[in-house]
Image (cartoon, helix red, strand yellow):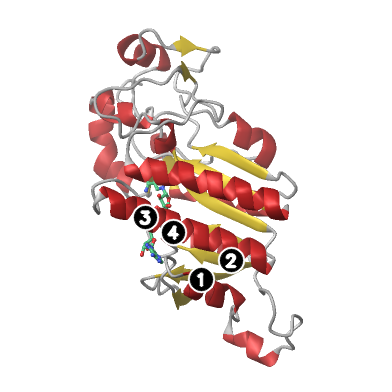
C-alpha cells in the first residue's frame, strides 16, 4: 500500500509509520516537522491548510514515481490509504479554542480530500478521552465496565470535543463515499522506554491511572492494530478502543472495582488483570491481539 501518514513525527507516529514501512508499505509522513527515518518519505504539510492537503494527497508519493507512467494521468490520488494521527494531542498545550480548531480543521481537510480524491481506506486517531473520564473536572466514573465502544461519549474538554467531532465528520464522509473509515479510540500511548520511567509510580499508586480507566497502549501494539485496520476491508465506519490486554497497575481488577468503581455496573466477569478498556471489538473484527505488557520488563510487585 501507498500510505499517506499524518503526524508520523509524533510520539505515536514515529513508531507506527516506520513499522508500517517495515511491513513492506510505502509511507509518506505528512507533518509540520520531519521524521528523518530512512524508510519513510517526509513531506512538510500544514494540515489545517485545505489547499496543502489536497495538493499533498494528489502529489507523487515518491521520487521513484518519476520513472513510472502515471496511471491516473495526474488526476485523483496515488495513495491507497490514509492514516491520520496529526493533532494537538491533549489539553493544555494550546488554548482550548486553538486545540479544537486545529484538530477539527486538519481532520475535516484530511477526510474530505482523501475520500473525494478516491482513497478507499482511512484510519484515524480518536481518543479514550471521548468517553469524558480523562479530562473531566473532578471525578467522573464510567457508566459501566469494561468500557466498550457503546459507552456514551460526552466529554467536557476541547481536545476530546475535537475527537468526537472528528468521528462525526468521518462517519459522514464514509456515508457519502462508501470508503472504509475506522477511528481508533487510543488509550494512553506508552513507548517501550517509558515502562522503566513511569510504571514504578503507577504500580505504587493506582490512583494515578484512574483518568485512563487504568489502561495503556504500547506503541508496538498500536502499530499492530493500525496495520490490521489497514488490511481489514469492508467494515464501513467503525470505532475501536485501542489498549493492551492488561491494566497499567499492580492492583487486581476486583481491588480497583472496590476502591474506584463503587456503584459502577460490572457487566461481566473479568480476569484478575484484564483491561477495563474493552478491546473485544478490535479482537473480533480486526484480529488484534496485544503482544506486549509492562510485565515483560518490570517485576510485578504483587507477584
Ligand atoms: N499520546 C497519547 O497518549 C494519545 C492518546 C490517545 C490519542 N492520541 C492521538 O494520537 C495521535 C498522535 O498522538 P501523539 O501523542 O503522537 O501526538 P504528538 O503531538 O506527539 O504528534 C502529533 C504530530 O502531529 C503533527 N501536527 C500537529 N499539527 C499539525 C498540522 N497542523 N499539520 C501537520 N502536522 C501537524 C505534529 O508536528 C506532531 O508530529 C493524535 O491524534 C492524538 O490526539 C494520543
Above/below status of 139 relative to 93:
above
The residue wearing badge 3 is 101
Q: CA distance from mark 2 to mark 1?
A: 7 Å
Above/below status of 250 relative to 265:
below
Ligand 1 falls in quadrant:
bottom left
Q: Earlier in the sequence, mark 1 or mark 3?
A: 1
Question: From the viewer's perspective, is 221 left or right of 88?
Answer: right
Residue for point 32% across, 20% down: 302
State the mark number for residue 177. none
State the mark number for residue 53. 1
Q: CA distance from mark 1 to mark 4?
A: 11 Å
The residue wearing badge 4 is 105
Determine which quarter of the picture holds residue 37.
bottom left
Q: Earlier in the sequence, mark 1 or mark 4?
A: 1
The residue wearing badge 2 is 113
Percent across and percent down for residue 226 are 57, 51
Dots 3, 4 in contact, CB < 8 A: yes
Dots 1, 4 in contact, CB < 8 A: no
Marks 1 and 4: which is nearer the front? 4
Dots 2, 1 in contact, CB < 8 A: yes
Amino acid at each position: 500500500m501507498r500510505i499517506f501518514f499524518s503526524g508520523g513525527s509524533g510520539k505515536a507516529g514515529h513508531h507506527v509509520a516506520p513499522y508500517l514501512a517495515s511491513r513492506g508499505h510505502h509511507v509518506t509522513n505528512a507533518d509540520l516537522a520531519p521524521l528523518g527515518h530512512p524508510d519513510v518519505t517526509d513531506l512538510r504539510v500544514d494540515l489545517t491548510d485545505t489547499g496543502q492537503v489536497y495538493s499533498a494527497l494528489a502529489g507523487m508519493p515518491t521520487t521513484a514515481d518519476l520513472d513510472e507512467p502515471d496511471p491516473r494521468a495526474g488526476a485523483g490520488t496515488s495513495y491507497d490509504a490514509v492514516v491520520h494521527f496529526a493533532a494537538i494531542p491533549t489539553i493544555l498545550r494550546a488554548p482550548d479554542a486553538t486545540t479544537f480548531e486545529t484538530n477539527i480543521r486538519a481532520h475535516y481537510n484530511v477526510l474530505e480530500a482523501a475520500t473525494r480524491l478516491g482513497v478507499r481506506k482511512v484510519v484515524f486517531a480518536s481518543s479514550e478521552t471521548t468517553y469524558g473520564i480523562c479530562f473531566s473536572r473532578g471525578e467522573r466514573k464510567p457508566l459501566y465496565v469494561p468500557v466498550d465502544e457503546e459507552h456514551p461519549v460526552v466529554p467536557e474538554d476541547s481536545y476530546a470535543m475535537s475527537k468526537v467531532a472528528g468521528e462525526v465528520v468521518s462517519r459522514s464522509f464514509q456515508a457519502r463515499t462508501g470508503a472504509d473509515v475506522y477511528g481508533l479510540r487510543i488509550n494512553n500511548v506508552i513507548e517501550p522506554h517509558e515502562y522503566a520511567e513511569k510504571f514504578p509510580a503507577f504500580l505504587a499508586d493506582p490512583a494515578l491511572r484512574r483518568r485512563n480507566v487504568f489502561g495503556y497502549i504500547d506503541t508496538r501494539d498500536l502499530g499492530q492494530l493500525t496495520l490490521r485496520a489497514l488490511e481489514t476491508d469492508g467494515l464501513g465506519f467503525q470505532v475501536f478502543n485501542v489498549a493492551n490486554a492488561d491494566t497499567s497497575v499492580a492492583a487486581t481488577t476486583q481491588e480497583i472495582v472496590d476502591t474506584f468503581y463503587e456503584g459502577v455496573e460490572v457487566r461481566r466477569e473479568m480476569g484478575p488483570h484484564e483491561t477495563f478498556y474493552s478491546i473485544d471489538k478490535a479482537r473480533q473484527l480486526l484480529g488484534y491481539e496485544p503482544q506486549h505488557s509492562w510485565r515483560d520488563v518490570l517485576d510485578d510487585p504483587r507477584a
